[in-house]
Amino acid sequence: MSSRTALTPVRRLLFTTLLSHGVLTLPDNRIGTAEITVPPRTPGPPPHWHEMHDETFYVTKGTIRFHIPEKIGMGAYLDAKAGDYVVVPTRAPHTFSNPFDVEGVFINTYTPVSNC
């Protein structure tokens, strides 16, 4: 892993640094990996789910809040701190945010790799 490429902000909310020109992927697309940096007080992406892949999140810095969309109004969330590992299975609605005052960073994997 020699080079890291910084991407432009997505919807001015989420800044992403991906490994190896966007995504680190095995040749047969079995797994993809990215390092995601979430600035303080960032709402994150809209609630979504993935048709074809499982997703994992390993928090390496700060705290990331994971939301269960159908329960958001009721306050259903998990605050994952550095060292915590979150698994989201295929077709499970989810989103994340960083409502805290410190930058959050996580390693994201998805298997198999798809176009989301």
Image (cartoon, rainbow, N blue to C red):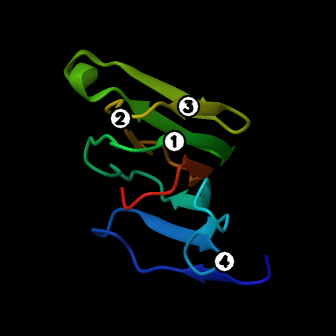
Residue 6, by quadrant, is bottom right
Callouts 1 and 2 close, C-beta under 8 Å: yes
User: Is 113 rendered above or below residue 66?
Assistant: below
Residue at 58 percent of width and 31 percent of height? 86
Q: Nearer the viewer, residue 113 or 8?
A: 113
Circle 2: residue type: His
Callouts 3 and 2 close, C-beta under 8 Å: no
Q: CA distance from mark 1 to mark 2?
A: 10 Å
Q: Which residue is mark 3?
A: 87
What is the x, y in percent for residue 68? 33, 26
Q: Which residue is mark 1?
A: 55
Quadrant location of the C terminus in the rendered image: bottom left
Residue at 45 percent of width and 44 percent of height? 53
Q: CA distance from mark 4 to mark 3?
A: 23 Å
Query: Neighbour class for label 3 at 10 Å: few (<14), some, many (≥20)?
Result: few
Residue 84 - label: none
Q: Answer with mark 4 or mark 1, whichever residue precedes in sequence.
A: 4
Circle 3: residue type: Val
Q: CA distance from mark 1 to mark 3?
A: 6 Å
Q: Answer with mark 3 or mark 2, whichever residue precedes in sequence.
A: 3
Q: CA distance from mark 3 to mark 2?
A: 11 Å
Q: Nearer the viewer, residue 95 or 112?
A: 112
Q: Which residue is mark 4?
A: 20
Residue at 34 percent of width and 69 percent of height? 10
